[in-house]
């Protein structure tokens, strides 16, 4: 069976497709699958996977040259004559349904949402599975297997990545250069900020101080070697954390997704603010502590029992409206209280769960 996978989303959402991809591989064997993504980081994620062919399409661009490129990509996909296309969660958007329809697979699989039932043209997908609000994204994606006659609940979801020997060597070389030995040192990763493009996840600027304090506490209480992770548009926030922290944390320079994953694999713990690196860390085997604001821990927090989600416990949260009450990323509050200062004591309590009491 020839399968087209569609994930026109970010890194975290695409990581949550991995168990679905592995189940499809188990069932359909050697036939390669095509995965359409919109982010180069997602292309890099599958660089070492022998049965996934990632195709990059930056659908947000609307200039004529880009639109012509999109049309060429769609025509190329149509010529492949796919037996099935699968659009992963969340997918309640017009562009996703149009893309799947124009790609021309014989069977088009997606989720059903009881919102904007005509505006997004969901009927262009001919097999839709109910999207249970209470389920995690991983499980929602696995539910799509039922359209192919497969049992979504068969076996434990496999989140493991495809890291190469050069990826692993890169991580070890980087740590050695910084005077860190992952065999003897306690390595902790911290991702203190989120891309400003994700406006509904923009934390209060004062959290820079919170993370600087946390990093110094990790160093003094546990002797931890702290790696500060940041994307290109998060550099300013990371630099401020580095300036404020007195314990000399190490900033990670830009690297490909699998090299970052290899570094995360060497972390005893990863602390983050609900970005794509949380799911990546969990998939790499590093327990993740994730601070969540308007999004639902049950749905979006890093998958697996080893991980911990922290919220303020506000009555109004979660209030992230997409995909059940909106067709675009949106929250209900103009100035959400859940994006204020993170409780440093809650962070420390979560850390002690993994690392023990420390010196205190």
Image: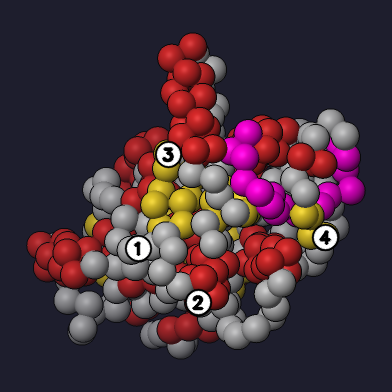
For residue 260, say whether it is visible: no
Q: How far apart, in angstroms, are the residues tagged by discs 1 and 2?
A: 14 Å
The disc, 4 or 1, on the residue closer to the chain's N-terminal end is 1
Which is closer to the viewer, label 2 or label 4?
A: 2
At mark 4, the secondary structure is strand
Q: Earlier in the sequence, mark 4 or mark 3?
A: 3
Residue on which disc 3 sits: 56
> Residue drawn at (54%, 27%), measured in percent from left and top?
60
In the image, residue 349 above or below residue 229: below
Question: Are there few (<14), some (14-19), or many (20+) residues within 10 Å of tag 1?
Answer: some
The residue beneath circle 4 is 130
Crowding around mark 4 (Cα neighbors within 10 Å: few <14, some 14 to 19, many 20+) is: few
Task: Residue at the far top: name it.
Answer: 64
**Picture coordinates of residue 245, whole percent (x, y):** 33, 55
Q: Which is nearer the eye, 353 or 100?
A: 100
Task: Between label 1 and label 2, give the one nearer the viewer.
Answer: 2
Labels 1 and 2: the sequence-earlier one: 2
Tell me what residue is drawn at x 67 percent, y 38 percent.
101
Look at the image and give the residue range highlighted in magenta.
102-117
């Amino acid at each position: 069976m020839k399968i087209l996978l569609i994930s026109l989303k970010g890194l975290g959402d695409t990581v949550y497709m991995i168990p679905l991809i592995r189940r499809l591989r188990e069932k359909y064997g050697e036939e390669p699958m095509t995965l359409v993504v919109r982010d180069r980081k997602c292309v890099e994620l599958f660089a070492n996977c022998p049965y996934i062919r990632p195709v990059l399409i930056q659908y947000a661009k609307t200039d004529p040259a880009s639109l012509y490129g999109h049309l060429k990509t769609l025509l190329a996909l149509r010529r492949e004559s796919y037996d099935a296309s699968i659009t992963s969660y969340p997918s309640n958007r017009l562009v996703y349904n149009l893309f799947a329809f124009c790609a021309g697979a014989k069977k088009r699989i997606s989720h059903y949402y009881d919102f904007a039932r005509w505006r997004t043209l969901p009927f262009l997908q001919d097999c839709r599975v109910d999207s249970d609000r209470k389920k995690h994204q991983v499980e929602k994606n696995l539910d799509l297997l039922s359209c192919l006659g497969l049992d979504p609940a068969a076996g434990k979801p496999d989140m493991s990545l495809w890291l190469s020997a050069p990826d692993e060597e890169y991580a070890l070389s980087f740590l050695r250069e910084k005077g860190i030995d992952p065999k003897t040192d306690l390595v902790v990763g911290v991702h203190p900020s989120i891309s400003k493009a994700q406006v509904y996840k923009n934390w209060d600027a004062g959290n820079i101080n919170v993370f600087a304090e946390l990093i110094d506490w990790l160093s003094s209480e546990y002797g931890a070697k702290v790696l500060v992770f940041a994307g290109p548009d998060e550099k300013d926030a990371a630099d401020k954390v580095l300036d404020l922290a007195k314990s000399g944390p190490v900033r990670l320079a830009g690297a490909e997704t699998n090299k970052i994953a290899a570094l995360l694999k060497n972390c005893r713990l990863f602390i983050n603010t609900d970005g794509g690196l949380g799911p990546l860390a969990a998939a790499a085997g590093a327990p993740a502590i994730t601070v969540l604001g308007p999004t639902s821990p049950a749905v979006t927090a890093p998958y697996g029992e080893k991980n911990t989600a922290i919220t303020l416990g506000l009555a109004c949260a979660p209030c992230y409206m997409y995909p059940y009450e909106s067709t675009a990323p949106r929250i209900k509050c103009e100035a959400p209280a859940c994006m204020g200062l993170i409780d440093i004591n809650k962070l420390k309590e979560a850390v002690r769960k993994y690392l023990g009491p420390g010196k205190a």
